[in-house]
Image: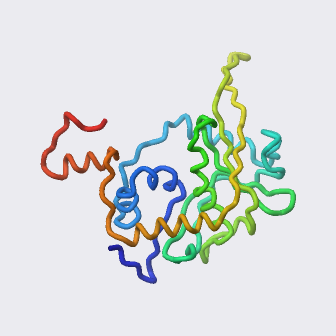
Amino acid sequence: MAKMTNNRLFKLSPSDFKYLWEDCKHCFYQKVVNGIELPSISIPGIFMKMNSILQNSVQGTNPRDLHPDLPNGIFELQERYLKSMAIPSKNTSYVSGKFDLLTRLKDGTHGVIDLKITDPKEDNIYKFKHQLHAYKFALENPAEGTRRYADKITKMGLMVLSPNEVKFHNDHLHFLAKPHWIEIEENMAEFFAFIDEVTSVLEGPLPEPTEKCKWCIYRARFGNGENKVDDLPF
C-alpha cells in the first residue's frame, strides 16, 4: 500500500484523467505512486505546430471573434504551468499541469479553454470535464510560492477544431475549420468526489493489470521470461 507522509503528495496531471486513468488504473498507479511512466508516444508535430500557431494568433483578441458562443472577453495568456495546493477532502494530492488558454472576461473573472484538434461529435468529449476542473482548481488555489494567474474561474470549455474544407489562394493551400465551443458546467463537488476516488486507488494496493491494456500485455509477455513476439497487440 502506498504510504503518505506530510512531505509527499500524489502529483496528478490533468491530462491523465481522460486517457490513462480511464484506460488503465494499473498504469496510472505505476506512474503516480512508483514513478514508472509509459514510454513516450510523440504527438505528430503538425498538431503541435497548429496548436501553437492558433494560440499565438488569438492573443489579445476577443474569443467571440472566432465563434459567437465563446466567452466574451480577451485571450490573455497561453500555456502556463500550474501547481495547486493540496486538494480536499483528503488533502493527499495536488494538480500539476499546463493549461492552453486563459481569457479575461468582461466581468473581471477568467475563463480557461482547452484546445482539441479532433472530431467535435465524439461522444466522449465531455470526459475532459475533470481536466478542466483541475485547471480551475489550480488557477484558483495555486501552491505557495507559485504565481497566481486568476482569482476566479467562471467559464470552462473546449474549443474543438476539425478541418473540413481546403481552398487554394495565391499559391497557398488553406485548411478551413469552424471552431466548436463545448462549455463545461462547473461542478466542483463532482470533481472533488472524483479526486477522492482517484486517491483512494492510489492509497491502496497496486491494481491488477488491465486485460486490454497494450502496455500491460507487453510487460506480461516479457516480464515472465517468455519473450514471445508473435502475438503482441501491436
Structure colour scheme: rainbow
Determine the residue located farthest toward the bottom in the rendered image: 6
| 211 or 59, nearer to the observer | 211
Residue 204 x, y percent position in the rendering: 36, 71
Q: What residue do we see at 44% from left, 77% from top?
A: 8
Say above or below: 84 vs 59: below
The correct choice, above or below, for 144 with respect to 11 in the image is: below
Callout count: 0
For the residue pair 204 and 54, the one nearer the viewer reads as 204
- Residue at 71% x, 37% y is 179
The image quadrant of residue 163 is top right
Q: Is 102 above or below relative to 52?
A: below
When asked about the image quadrant of residue 208, the answer is bottom left
Image quarter hosting the C terminus:
top left
Q: Could you tell me which quadrant the N terminus lies in?
A: bottom left
Farthest-out residue, right: 106
At x 67%, y 22%, the residue is 165
Could you say which is closer to the camera, residue 161 or residue 198?
198
Where is residue 164 shown, x and y percent of the image? 66, 25
Q: Please name the residue shown 75% across and 43% down the image.
A: 58
- Across and down, in percent, residue 60 comes to 80, 49
Residue 189 as seen in the image, left or right of residue 183: left
Residue 42 horizontal side relative to residue 155, left or right: left
Q: Is 192 rendered above or below residue 209?
A: below
Q: Quadrant of residue 170?
A: top right
| Residue 52 rendering spot, x and y as whole percentages | 63, 42
